Image (cartoon, rainbow, N blue to C red):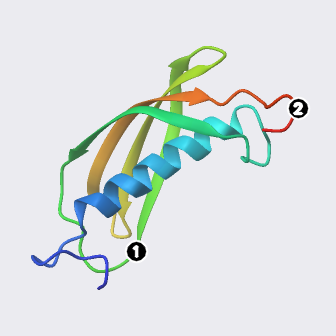
């Protein structure tokens, strides 16, 4: 209930946050099996296609292109009943390690 807007549907900002997080984590997993290597969001386009209602949602993402430092990632946010709530596509940049070799 605390993530619903005044109209009783999932707040768009929460949906965008979940999609951004899924994209960044997916990008990170391409270079680090633990998913801890940071990627920066360069751009994120979100399309809201359905109303998120009470209940759980799942955000999933997949890399659709890119190279060594920039990745193109697509994602979707789905209600537990299978309803598609939103989709996103974005560009994510690998953060270079610092001088000590740390991410």
Residue identified by numbered label 2: 101
Rendering coords of residue 20 (x, y %): 44, 47
Asked if residue 59 is positioned above or below residue 73 in the image, the reply reads below
Residue with the most extreme right position: 100
Rendering coords of residue 95 (x, y %): 66, 31
Residue with the most extreme left position: 7
Residue identified by numbered label 1: 56
- Residue sitting at x 25%, y 69%: 10
Rendering coords of residue 70 (x, y %): 56, 20
Crowding at mark 2 (Cα within 10 Å: few <14, some 14-19, many 20+): few
Q: For residue 1, what is the image quadrant?
A: bottom left
Residue with the most extreme top position: 67
Rendering coords of residue 21 (x, y %): 50, 51
Q: Nearer the viewer, residue 83 or 72?
A: 72
Is 83 on the left or on the right of 29, as rendered? left
- Residue sitting at x 72%, y 46%: 35
Q: For residue 14, what is the image quadrant?
A: bottom left
Is 63 on the left or on the right of 49, as rendered? right
Do the residues bearing badges 1 and 2 touch, measured as CB atoms within 8 Å? no
């Amino acid at each position: 209930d605390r993530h619903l807007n005044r109209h009783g549907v999932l707040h768009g900002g929460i949906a965008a946050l979940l999609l951004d997080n899924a994209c960044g984590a997916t990008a990170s997993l391409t270079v680090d099996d633990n998913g801890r290597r940071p990627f920066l969001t360069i751009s994120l386009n979100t399309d809201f296609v359905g109303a998120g209602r009470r209940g759980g949602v799942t955000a999933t993402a997949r890399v659709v292109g890119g190279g060594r430092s920039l990745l193109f990632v697509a994602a979707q946010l789905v209600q537990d009943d299978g309803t598609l709530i939103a989709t996103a596509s974005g560009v994510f940049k690998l953060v270079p390690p610092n001088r000590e070799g740390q991410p």
